Image (cartoon, rainbow, N blue to C red):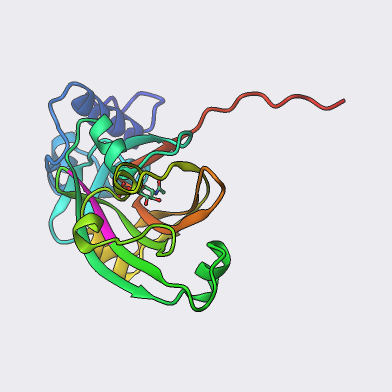
Amino acid sequence: MIDKNSPLPIYYQIQEWIRKKMDDGEWEPGDMLPSERIFAEQFNISRMTVRQAITELVNEGLLRREKGKGTFVAEKKLEQPLQGLTSFTEDMKARGFQPGNKLYEFRVTPPSRDVADALNMKKTDSVYELERVRLADNKPMALEMTSIHAGVVTNLSKDIAQSSLYNYIEQTLGLTIGHASQTLESALAGEKEAELLQIEAGDPILWISRKTHLQDGTPFEYVRSAYRGDRYKFSIHLPRSTRRH
Ligand code: 16G
């Protein structure tokens, strides 16, 4: 298993051993790893070496540490393509997960200056403010803070906010969603994100901001979402741009 005469560093050999256990399905997402002490005794190596091996796999997202509990095999990350304007509900259904929602906030207010700018609103207009934790098979995936132009998307209710917003907009209101622009930035979870996403403060998250328009160009939605860094990876197709001479 571990060859102390090999030119490969021992921590690396331990990592390969752990990876193999996971590849072979012997260790599955959610399984707890033996403690550092047991590892060290089993392989007759120092705990520091074990810690180094594990820390790198935690940083890669293959393992996760839970304070006071131990180290666990992490869930596989969900790969989300960034092209195509889809809704959370559609994305989860397409993957065979049961989409869910926890609605923490639902109110109608005048828009903040940012939202008014983003959605071309007057100060006297109204906006629906929603705060939702989006779930896949009951597990929190993302926290969404959504502002919806109340003059465009009318009669929104708590019930609707607890299911699919895009479905309501398209099927019930008969509007056509056209395009969106998005930005992504990495960050560390603060207390609020950590609590709602069931992670630790300081864990990695990805903030996505989206502004969405109807087909006629009217902006109707401005959303800031915090995605769990350990549950998501984003993919994008990159056609070679036409070269300029
Ligand atoms: C996605 C969108 C969000 C939209 C929601 C509608 C991103 C970053 N966000 O989560 O802008 O409001 O879908 O989902 O992709 P729903 O129809 O399930 O409510």
Image point (25%, 42%), residue name: 63
From this viewpoint, is residue 199 visible? no
Relative depth, front residue between 17 and 113: 113
Residue lying farthest right?
A: 245
Q: Is residue 128 left or right of residue 214?
A: left
Q: Residue 10: x percent and y percent?
A: 33, 34
Which quadrant does the N terminus fall into? top left
Image point (27%, 30%), residue name: 94
Relative depth, front residue between 162 and 239: 162
From this viewpoint, is residue 240 visible? yes
5 vs 223: above or below: above
Which quadrant does the C terminus fall into? top right
Q: Quadrant of residue 203?
A: bottom left
Q: Residue 60: x percent and y percent?
A: 37, 41
18 vs 32: above or below: above
Q: Quadrant of residue 110?
A: bottom left
Q: Is residue 128 left or right of residue 28?
A: right
Instruction: Tell me the magenta residue range.
Output: 132-136
Q: Residue 170: x percent and y percent?
A: 35, 43
Q: Is residue 118 left or right of residue 170?
A: right
Relative depth, front residue between 73 and 139: 139
Q: Residue 81: x percent and y percent?
A: 43, 33
15 vs 176: above or below: above
- Is residue 143 highlighted in magenta? no
Q: Quadrant of residue 26?
A: top left
In terms of secondary structure, what is the magenta stretch mainly?
Answer: strand
Relative depth, front residue between 176 and 139: 176
Image point (25%, 30%), residue name: 95
Image point (37%, 56%), residue name: 226
Total labels: the figure holds 0
